[in-house]
Image (cartoon, rainbow, N blue to C red):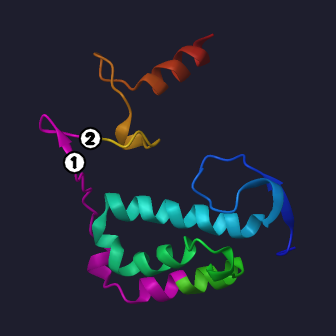
């Protein structure tokens, strides 16, 4: 049901404009907004994606939920395939290079977002998350 209305302010993305404890909103439109923000984060990290996914991300993160696209999963897949059809096989195989716009003392300044590229490393070189899961598995 595309018209399902809910209330609440829970979720990781606190930038969703319509989140409310009292005014019902369409949860599917919230999902679209949040996915648009995921695309925006990827575009920020990999600027080469901007020409292909920038317009889609912009439309998905409109402040007014009525201005955001609505589509089924099959329509979204078709739109994605159209975007990819404009890319050469070389482009599709090439590696994206991350862009870190700001530095502190010559090192990238991370946003604090959860991303495996940003995991903290211990002196041994293993990530803290991996060490924790490895020690739990041994118990």
Give whichever of 9, 97 is nearer the camera. 9
Left-right relation of 38 to 76: left
On the image, which quarter does residue 111 sit in? top left
Give whichever of 76, 20 is nearer the camera. 20
Considering every residue shown, the one lying at the far top of the view is 139
Left-right relation of 122 to 78: left
x and y percent of residue 22 in the render?
84, 54
Q: Height in image: 56 above or below 102?
A: below
x and y percent of residue 52 in the render?
38, 80
- Tell me how far mark 2 sits from mark 1, CA to CA: 6 Å
- Residue linked to disc 2: 109
Does label 2 or label 1 sit earlier along the sequence?
Answer: 1
Q: Residue at x 47, y 41 (%)?
A: 114
Quadrant including the N terminus: bottom right
On the image, which quarter does residue 60 sit in? bottom right
x and y percent of residue 65 in the render?
67, 74
x and y percent of residue 17 in the render?
63, 62
Marks 2 and 1: CB-CB under 8 Å? yes
Can residue 116 be seen in this snapshot?
Answer: yes
On the image, which quarter does residue 87 sit in? bottom left
Q: Residue at x 34, y 72 (%)?
A: 49
Q: Height in image: 5 above or below 102?
A: below
Q: Height in image: 78 above or below 26?
A: below
Q: For label 1, count other residues whose C-alpha is less than 10 Å away and answer few (under 14), some (14-19) or many (20+).
A: few
Considering every residue shown, the one lying at the far front of the view is 22
- Residue linked to disc 1: 102
Q: Residue at x 36, y 24 (%)?
A: 126
- Residue numbers of the magenta segment: 80-109
Can residue 69 be seen in this snapshot?
Answer: no
Quadrant including the C terminus: top right
Q: How many marks?
A: 2
Q: For label 2, count other residues whose C-alpha is less than 10 Å away and answer few (under 14), some (14-19) or many (20+).
A: few
């Amino acid at each position: 049901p595309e018209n399902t209305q809910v209330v609440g302010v829970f979720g990781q993305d606190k930038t969703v404009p319509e989140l409310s404890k009292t005014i019902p909103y369409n949860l599917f439109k919230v999902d679209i907004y949040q996915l648009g923000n995921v695309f925006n984060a990827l575009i920020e990290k990999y600027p080469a994606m901007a020409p292909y996914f920038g317009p889609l991300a912009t439309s998905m993160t409109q402040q007014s939920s009525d201005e955001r696209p609505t589509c089924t999963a099959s329509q979204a897949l078709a739109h994605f395939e159209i975007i990819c059809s404009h890319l050469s096989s070389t482009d599709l195989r090439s590696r994206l290079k991350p862009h870190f716009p700001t530095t502190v003392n010559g090192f990238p300044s991370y946003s604090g977002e959860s991303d495996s590229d940003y995991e903290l490393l211990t002196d041994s070189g293993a990530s803290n998350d991996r060490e924790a899961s490895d020690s739990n598995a041994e118990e």
